[in-house]
């Protein structure tokens, strides 16, 4: 079964600190992996997208890594800000036929002052 | 182009009533998707269109749900005889073809449905 699992489920960190969110997937065949940020009551906003051949991709203070062999990805947030408080969702595209997105349940991050 | 627009943002309806949501995708995008998201969960796929053709529907899309994209531009999602279990955020997304590469998927802000 195609699944995406994220950890931790929730996280509280102090403003200015770094954190790393994890994503494990079993989607096969694999096409690409995306990280989205979703503010409460809003739609997801894309942070990064990585294909099979990409190991790392950065977007400002966000750096995503991908290990296609172990089917793991991480999202590292540097020097966190209060505005980083949101849910971070790992999404894998793949499967056969229509490459629908398989969503993780997200990590809820709270950055505390 | 201001991205994917969804209307209304919020809808409160009584059980048994019909509701209709609208999604305006990014104009260059040929694919349009509908997802449903409940609290604390990731979005679940409902259906997608390539241009005006509805190419796939999830088993989550019961016969009370119908989606259209008549001219290959905007789409509507109608829920008939709403039930309390239909309460969720309904997200629309669009993409150019499969949404790979730098295009990705672009999501709207969603329509929050509450059935009372």
Image (cartoon, grey):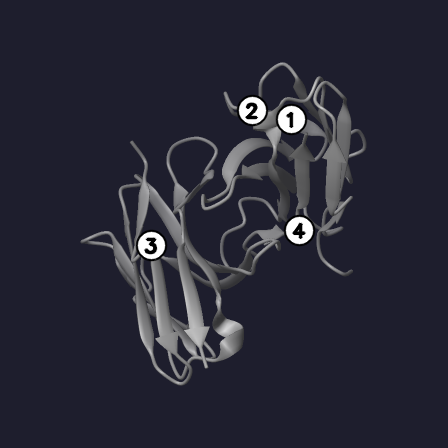
User: Between B49 and B90, which is closer to the camera in this rendering?
Assistant: B90
**Marks 2 and 3 belong to one chain:** no
Cα separation, mark 4 vs mark 1, equals 19 Å
* Residue, disc 3: A9
Quarter containing the N terminus of chain A: top left
| Helix, strand or loop under label 4 | loop
Q: Which numbered disc, 4 or 2, marks the residue closer to the eye?
A: 4
**Marks 4 and 2 belong to one chain:** yes
Q: Residues within 10 Å of mark 1 (few under 14, many from 20)?
A: some
Residue B18: percent from left, percent from top: 76, 22
Q: Which numbered disc, 4 or 3, marks the residue closer to the eye?
A: 3
* Residue, disc 4: B108
Res B57 label: 2
Q: Residues within 10 Å of mark 4 (few under 14, many from 20)?
A: many
Cα separation, mark 3 vs mark 1, equals 35 Å
Res B54 label: 1
């Amino acid at each position: 079964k195609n699944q995406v699992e994220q950890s931790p489920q929730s996280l509280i960190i102090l403003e200015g600190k770094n954190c790393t969110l994890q994503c494990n997937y079993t989607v096969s065949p694999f096409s690409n992996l995306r990280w989205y940020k979703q503010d409460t009551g809003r739609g997801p906003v894309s942070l990064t997208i990585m294909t099979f051949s990409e190991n790392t991709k950065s977007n400002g203070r966000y750096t995503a890594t991908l290990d296609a062999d172990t089917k793991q990805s991480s999202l590292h947030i540097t020097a966190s800000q209060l505005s980083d408080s949101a849910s971070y969702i790992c999404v894998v595209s793949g499967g056969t036929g229509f490459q629908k997105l398989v969503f993780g349940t997200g990590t809820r991050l709270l950055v505390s002052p | 182009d201001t991205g994917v627009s969804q209307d209304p943002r919020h809808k409160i309806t009584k059980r048994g009533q019909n509701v209709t949501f609208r999604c305006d995708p990014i104009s260059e995008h040929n694919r349009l998707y509908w997802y449903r998201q409940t609290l604390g969960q990731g979005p679940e796929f409902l259906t997608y269109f390539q241009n005006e053709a509805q190419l796939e529907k999830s088993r989550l899309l019961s016969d009370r749900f119908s989606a259209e994209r008549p001219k290959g531009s905007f789409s509507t999602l109608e829920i008939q005889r709403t039930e309390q279990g239909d309460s969720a955020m309904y997200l629309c997304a669009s993409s150019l073809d499969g949404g790979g590469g730098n295009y990705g998927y672009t999501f709207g802000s969603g329509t929050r449905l509450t059935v009372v």
